[in-house]
Amino acid sequence: MDSHSHCLTHAKESGYTNAFQQAFACWVYAVFQHAVWNGSVTLVLLPGPVGQFLQNWMLNLGFVSVPSDVVINSIETLLILAFFIYMTGKLRSKPAPPSVPSPGERKEIAGKPTAVTA
């Protein structure tokens, strides 16, 4: 069992009291992100002037013209990157839970096993 599932099944011991809520929130975000990312491709299918505008619009940077779908995907990519940087900062600022070995548990430091602690 990896450490992520251990945090879900042993929430109190791992120090993550809201583990299921956090896992569910991450899942909801992943579904939302994929829906937005995949849904943005279909924006050109919108009826009326909006769909036609997105089909024909090109961002002219002088040396290159960028189609609207690339511009939209680039903006989405930057927003997703900003969210991941924000979440990484939040996770890093969390102090690590203290690790107290149980009696009789072996501790390993720098790849060298030590004596059994009692």
Image (tube, helix red, strand yellow):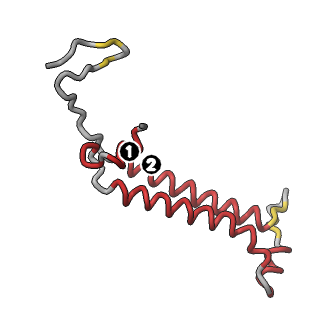
How far across and down, in percent of the image, does residue 110 sit? 35, 16
Q: Around disc 1, counting alpha carbons within 10 Å, would you say few (fewer than 14), some (14 to 19), or many (20 or more)?
A: few
- The kind of secondary structure element at disc 2 is helix
Q: Are marks 2 and 1 in contact (CB under 8 Å)?
A: yes
Going by the numbered disc 1, the residue's amino acid type is Arg
Q: Is residue 111 left or right of residue 17?
A: right
Please report the residue visible at 45 percent of the width from the left and 48 percent of the height from the top. Answer: 88
How far across and down, in percent of the image, does residue 102 sit? 19, 29
Q: Nearer the viewer, residue 52 or 99?
A: 99
Q: Around disc 2, counting alpha carbons within 10 Å, would you say few (fewer than 14), some (14 to 19), or many (20 or more)?
A: few
How far across and down, in percent of the image, does residue 73 sit? 70, 61
Q: Is residue 76 above or below residue 4?
A: below
Q: Is residue 86 left or right of residue 94?
A: right
Q: Which residue does the numbered mark 2 point to in the structure image?
A: 88
State the quadrant of the C terminus.
top left
Please report the residue visible at 79 percent of the width from the left and 74 percent of the height from the top. Answer: 44
Please report the residue visible at 58 percent of the width from the left and 62 percent of the height from the top. Answer: 33
